Image: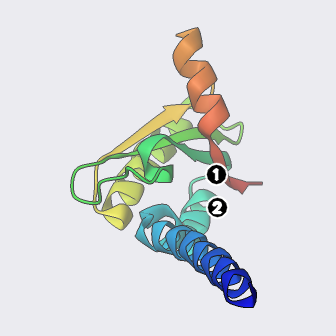
Amino acid sequence: MEEAGNRGLETEAAQRINRCYSAYESALMSPVQTNIEEIVRLCRRYQVRRLAAFGSVLRPDFDSLRSDADFLVEFEPVPAAIRIKNYLALRNALASLLSRNVDLIEDGAIRNPYILKSATQQQQILYAA
C-alpha cells in the first residue's frame, strides 16, 4: 500500500516537472520574451504608448522558422508625419531584432469584429507608457 502511494506521489511530481519544463521551453522559444528589454527600448525610442503581441508568437504552435510576429501598437499623439516615420522605423526594427516578418497593426485599424475580438483576447501587453 505504501509503495502504491509513493508511485502516485512520483507521478504527480513528474507531471509538475513536465508542466514547468513545457512553460520554460515555450518561453525560451518565444523571440518576444528573449528580446523584451530591446523591445521596450524600441518602444521608448519610437514614441509608443502601448505595444501588445498577439497570434502565433505567443502560442506553443509558433514556428521559429516560418511564423511572423503580430503586434498591436498605439503611438503617443504626435504629428502624422512623425507617427508614420515612427511606425515604419519600429516595424523595421522589430523585424530585424526578431529575424522575421512583422505585422504591426495600429490601434483602431482592425475593423472585422471577429478578428478584433480574437486579437484583443489573445494579446499580451509588452509595453505601456
On-image quarter of the N terminus: bottom right
Pointer 2 residue: 44
Tags 2 and 1 touching, CB below 8 Å: yes
Task: Give the residue at the far front of this rendering.
Answer: 1
Residue 4 x %, y % = 67, 81
Residue drawn where x is 44% and y is 51% of the image: 57
The dot on residue 47 is: 1
- Residue 95, quarter of picture: bottom left
Give the residue type that dot 1 points to. Gln
- Residue 114, quarter of picture: top right
Label 1 secondary element: loop
Residue 90 x %, y % = 46, 51
Give the residue type that dot 2 points to. Arg
Q: Is residue 119 or residue 6 the one in the foreground?
A: 6
Mark 2 surroundings within 10 Å by alpha-carbon count, few (fewer than 14), some (14 through 19), many (20 or more)? some
On-image quarter of the C terminus: bottom right
Residue drawn where x is 41% and y is 51% of the image: 89
Residue drawn where x is 55% and y is 31% of the image: 106
**Relative to 36, is 3 on the left or the right?**
right
Q: Is residue 8 or residue 59 the one in the foreground?
A: 8
**Relative to 70, is 110 on the left or the right?**
right
